[in-house]
Amino acid sequence: MIPIALDPAHLSIALVGRGDLAVRRFGSLRAGGATATTIYSDAPRPLLVQAAGDRLVRRLPSDADLASISLLWIADLPPDAARDLAVRARAAKVLVNVEDDRPNCDFHNVAQVRRGDLLLTASTNGASPGLASMVREQLERTYTADWAERLERLRGRRADWRAEGRTMDEVGRRTRAAVAEEGWLP
């Protein structure tokens, strides 16, 4: 596993699905900032139609569509259709995730907790999604909603320190000192 955080502003992201799993994945993508996600569905259920709005394309992606995509999530498709689409996408050099089908995934989704721009994740590399979920629940209890505001306060202080010409090492030390002073971490 190579954990990375991708900026959706620099990628073309698409989702293919039909129902609840696609709706859930679309919500997760939007929460991560992927506001321009295209949703393809040959048989969208009403909840997906509602969630996708004008982002919905009522068909599966063509090879030309795939050529313009960077990342593709596939959910709620029959296994054969998902596998075939994943093969076509890879041929177009698209990174693919097929929901709950690890052999057909180039990447997988981590359990996550968002507190503003603070993103905490847990992964078991697919070995035990249930354990990853339990770790996520613990992170939710530990890192409550007020962490979003805490991060904003640190963002402002960091900007000030950088404007003063502080080095990255100095900014790091000042951040540690500020967090310790506030008693935010044990």
Image: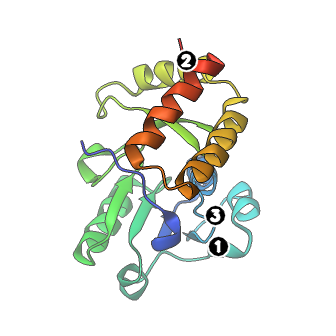
Per the model, the C-alpha gap separating discs 2 and 3 is 45 Å
Query: x and y percent of residue 15 in the render?
Result: 51, 64
Pick the quarter of the image with the N terminus.
Answer: top left
Closer to the camera in the image, 30 or 104? 30
Q: Of the residues under marks 1 and 2, which one precedes in the sequence?
A: 1
Q: From this viewpoint, which residue is outermost toward the bottom?
A: 64
Callout 3: SS:
loop
Which residue position is annotated with label 1? 56
Which residue position is annotated with label 2? 185
Which residue position is annotated with label 3? 44
On screen, residue 35 versus residue 112, left or right, reads: right
Asked if labels 3 and 2 touch by Cβ distance under 8 angstroms, the answer is no
Q: How is the image coloured?
A: rainbow
Callout 1: SS:
strand
Query: x and y percent of residue 17 in the render?
Result: 53, 60
On screen, residue 12 versus residue 26, left or right, reads: left
Q: Of the residues under marks 2 and 3, which one precedes in the sequence?
A: 3
Q: Residues within 10 Å of mark 2 (few under 14, many from 20)?
A: few
Q: Residue at x 47, y 42 (%)?
A: 171
On screen, residue 66 versus residue 138, left or right, reads: left
Q: Residues within 10 Å of mark 3 (few under 14, many from 20)?
A: many
The kind of residue tagged 1 is: Leu
The kind of residue tagged 2 is: Leu
163 to 13, vertically: above or below: above
